[in-house]
Image: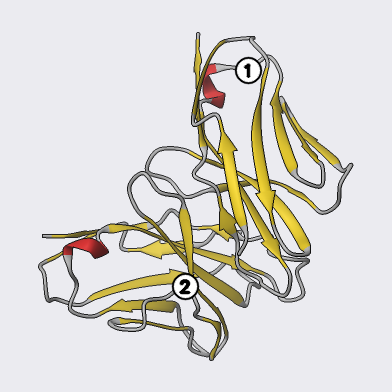
Amino acid sequence: NAGVMQNPRHLVRRRGQEARLRCSPMKGHSHVYWYRQLPEEGLKFMVYLQKENIIDESGMPKERFSAEFPKEGPSILRIQQVVRGDSAAYFCASSPPGSRDTEAFFGQGTRLTVV
Amino acid sequence: EDQVTQSPEALRLQEGESSSLNCSYTVSGLRGLFWYRQDPGKGPEFLFTLYSAGEEKEKERLKATLTKKESFLHITAPKPEDSATYLCAVSGGSNYKLTFGKGTLLTVNP
């Protein structure tokens, strides 16, 4: 049973470009969460999605950031017009439907560097 | 707002020297307290979930306990391969999101 798959593992973008981060949840999981980890800081919640629905995006910046989890295919976190401050590790987690609380399993992350 | 504070920030142990990591939390209506292990350059690896005060869980050399205000991760006779950052997180109320502490960096010397 493959774990949560994220790609790419490393992504370098110039300021002003777009970054697209992909996350394929574990088989049978329909809940996806995105977290951001800045250097010397803890993991911060960004957004919680179920298939075709955004459930909670309270941690996501209002501008330039968007997320989707289509009926088919991976979840995408999209960052438009990236700035240096967006450099961080972005982690995706997934959990099965009906799971108690949030026993979420994390992927290996995408490390975004903005130059 | 949910808050999690972990201490110490860093801990160095000799192989075989048992110790404990602390996680203090404030949350409105605890749904669960979670412990993860994170190795450099990797994603967090799930260890335990605790749901109510008094609950304990064990896995190999690790044992997690929970009170109404804090959780402890006890490490018995650690080995160098236990070296990692240990993260504590909570979820509370109607939220499904996890609030994480900054972690404790554990180094076990041979």
The residue tagged 2 is A59
User: In the picture shown, does residue A86 fall above or below A89?
Assistant: below
Determine if residue A10 is in view.
no
Task: Please give the name of the residue rendered at 72% of the width and 52% of the height, measured from the top-left corner.
Answer: B33
Judge left or right: residue A111 versus residue B69: left
Residue most extreme to the right: B54
Front residue (pair B4, A104): B4
**What chain letter is assigned to the residue under label 2?**
A
Task: Please give the name of the residue rendered at 62% of the width and 60% of the height, measured from the top-left corner.
Answer: B2
User: In the picture shown, does residue A9 fall above or below A96?
Assistant: above
Judge left or right: residue B92 versus residue A16: right
Q: Nearer the viewer, mark 1 or mark 2?
A: 2
Give the percent coordinates (x, y) of residue A57.
49, 80
User: In the picture shown, does residue A112 fall above or below B107?
Assistant: below
The residue tagged 1 is B78
Q: Are discs 1 and 2 located on one and the same chain?
A: no
- Disc 2 residue type (three-letter): Gly
**What chain letter is assigned to the residue under label 1?**
B
Find residue B48 and report its image quarter. Answer: top right
User: In the picture shown, does residue B53 fall above or below B9?
Assistant: below
Give the percent coordinates (x, y) of residue B22.
65, 33
